[in-house]
Image: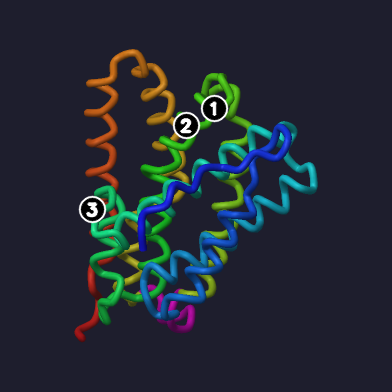
Amino acid sequence: MAQTQWTAERIGQFVAVDPLVDRMRELRSTWHPSDGVAVFNRVYLTVTEEIGHAIEAGTFEDRRAAATLDVRFAERYLAAVDAVASGTPAPACWRPLFHYRRHPGVRPLQFALAGINAHVGHDLALAVVDSCRDLRCAPADLEDEFDRVGDVLVLLEERIREELMPGPDLLEIADPLTHLLGCWSLDRARDGAWLAARSLWQLRGLPELAEEFTERLDRSVGLVGRMLLTPLAGP
């Protein structure tokens, strides 16, 4: 597949979420359900649909800002998908998920959380900066939208853990997956993304430093993703 620029369509003063949802649905129908990227795609499709419904319902005070952040966020994931499809390296944060996507020793919950780690830990910060440029505002002006999107992610993470965590509750404490996933926190990832976005905004007049900061963020998030995808069973 040729790399596609999923630029937000503008409808009046709003950006359209629907084309991105349609693309994720297309990917869902294309990939095998056990594919690790497909596992994350199903999760993220649900998030994007939830946020889209919230925007339409007027849950966000600034609908334009919320839609812009949601679209710029989703574009980062789809750009990684298109890069891999075209033979171009994905950002370092996404490489572990694409590399281990068919590993039989990695469980669905690991795939889902590794994708969330890449998307929140790296992409969300850059999406905030992209949105600030689009809207000609500072990160502080998007804090409410950032927090509301984060609230949806937290609820979704809880649902993912309930649905994909294997075994009865009495056995979970002995499962190595429980210990592995206890090392990662969505709340910490969100806090890190917000700090990274504010830092990148302050560095916008220093492109070399901003690029170095972005590269280091990408690599560090990728290392966490590799840890989350540690195989827990043999082939």
Q: Residues within 10 Å of mark 3 (few under 14, many from 20)?
A: some
Q: Vertically, is 143 above or below 6? A: above
Mark 2 belongs to which amino acid? Asp
Residue on which disc 1 sits: 134
Instruction: Specify the quadrant that holds the C terminus.
Output: bottom left
| Mark 1: secondary structure | helix
Q: Residue furthest front?
A: 2
Residue 40, image x, y percentages: 44, 65
Mark 1 belongs to which amino acid? Asp
Residue on which disc 3 sits: 89
Q: Residues within 10 Å of mark 2 (few under 14, many from 20)?
A: some
Separation (CA) of disc 3 from disc 1: 26 Å
Q: Residues within 10 Å of mark 1 (few under 14, many from 20)?
A: few
Task: Tell me which residue sits at (20%, 84%) in the image.
Answer: 234
Query: In the rendered structure, which segment of residues is drawn in magenta?
Result: 165-173
Residue 195 in the magenta stretch? The answer is: no
